[in-house]
Amino acid sequence: MSNETIQRPEWVPAEAGAEFTTQVMPGVTGGHDGLTSTSATPSVISPRRRQLSVTDYVEGVLNNDRMILGRAITLIESNAPAHMETAQAVLKELLPHTGKSIRVGITGVPGVGKSTFIEALGCHLIEQGHRLAVLAVDPTSTLTRGSILGDKTRMERLTRETQAFIRPSPSGGTLGGVTRKSRETILLCEAAGFDVILVETVGVGQSETTVRSMVDFFLLLMLTGAGDELQGIKKGIMELADALLINKADGDNLTRAKVARGEYTRAVHYLAPATQGWRTQVHTCSAVTGDGIAKIWSVIEEFRQKMTASGTLEARRHAQAIEWVYAMIEEHLRTSFYHHPAVVAALPAMKEAVINGSLPATLAATELLAKFERERF
Ligand SMILES: Nc1nc2c(ncn2[C@@H]2O[C@H](COP(=O)(O)OP(=O)(O)OP(=O)(O)O)[C@@H](O)[C@H]2O)c(=O)[nH]1
Ligand SMILES: [Mg+2]
């Protein structure tokens, strides 16, 4: 197929090179059955999109123009310096319109039912009149753009809802990069008027801590009957959660789920609570039948109401914002250190010297830091 007929989807930056493999192909001219089309409409390929100004972005997002919201997120996700500058100008303008949502993190091992749960909860929320954005944080995603895109079948209703906005994980890069992009995407979605933000992450180590640091409420989906060794691994993650939700409490599994609920309820007594003044709750649900979905949402609302009244929620958001500043400074310093030509040049020999015992580790670090400082400006 020639280049003219292959088109880029809206989220691909205009200047992007081959790192974006995504493309949109025009539809077949005939019918999918191979017969000649009876439709008179030719397949249209739109001209190159026009550049948007900061004001275009700001107004578009505030008016909940989904196309512009999508492009604003793409801008935020771009690593090109020119894009970053525009993105930050847009964010600065939008900042006064952010912060009004409830931000909920959702995690759990692959197959626990996160996507099915988000579909069920999302539809429940929309029925209640909420507007909902679903974002994913998946630092392992590279070219697949996260698992959400492959989830169309599990979130079939939600993807069709105009009151829902679903965005896959920013692809590639460091966890720090993915974090920044996700945090800023939350802000954009809030400015666009979404009042519930669900941030999904797969249960792979570090990403839970990252998502915890950007949400108000953190929900851990669990299964009954997972082996003891698995439960052990989860202790650290359980301490991040404001609620444990045992999914797939249906059919033959219902009784076991109820027993597990009792066990986990006793277990969380011994854990440090994730949020001061809130006891970690344990509930059961079935994302398939919908049992327990309304209950878990009422728990989240109760949390919001109590933690707002006590000032805990506001304090958490303040702390998260400051932590974020520090995290970005640290990331920047780390990157500039390891990319500094003097450091790059000296590092291999230093490593060698440390390994063969001719240079103490502390001295190696001090000398590298001195090179970085001396030749910085
Ligand atoms: N019986 C039952 N099956 C469920 C329930 N929730 C999800 N499932 C099934 O469990 C399987 C995995 O569900 P997903 O929603 O894809 O799980 P996930 O956590 O998103 O998985 P990953 O995207 O791979 O991390 C699917 O076959 C679902 O139909 C439930 O409440 N009850
Ligand atoms: Mg999934």
Image: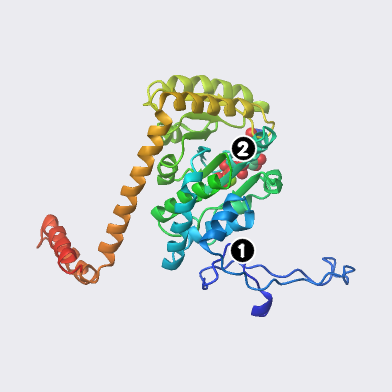
Q: Residue at the spot x=45%, y=26% of the render?
A: 307
Q: Look at the numbered disc 2 and give the secondary structure of its residue.
A: helix
Query: Which residue appears farthest toward the right when viewing the image?
Result: 38
Mark number, residue 117: 2
Q: Look at the numbered disc 1 and give the secondary structure of its residue.
A: loop
Q: How is the image coloured?
A: rainbow
Q: Quadrant of ligand 2?
A: top right
Q: Is residue 170 visible?
A: yes
Q: Is residue 145 visible?
A: no
Identify which residue, 304 or 116, lies in the foreground. Answer: 304
As drawn, is 374 to the left or to the right of 226?
A: left
Q: Upstream in the sequence, badge 2 or badge 1? A: 1
Q: Position of residue 340 (x, y in %)?
A: 25, 68
Q: Amino acid at mark 2?
A: Phe
Q: Position of residue 94 (x, y in %)?
A: 49, 50
Q: Is mark 1 within 8 Å of ligand 2?
A: no
Dot 1, how many residues are within 10 Å of its Cα: few (below 14), some (14-19), or many (20+)?
some
Q: Is mark 2 within 8 Å of ligand 1?
A: yes
Q: Position of residue 17 (x, y in %)?
A: 51, 73
* Quadrant (top left/top right/bottom left/bottom right) for the C terminus: bottom left
- Residue beneath disc 1: 10
* Quadrant (top left/top right/bottom left/bottom right) for the N terminus: bottom right
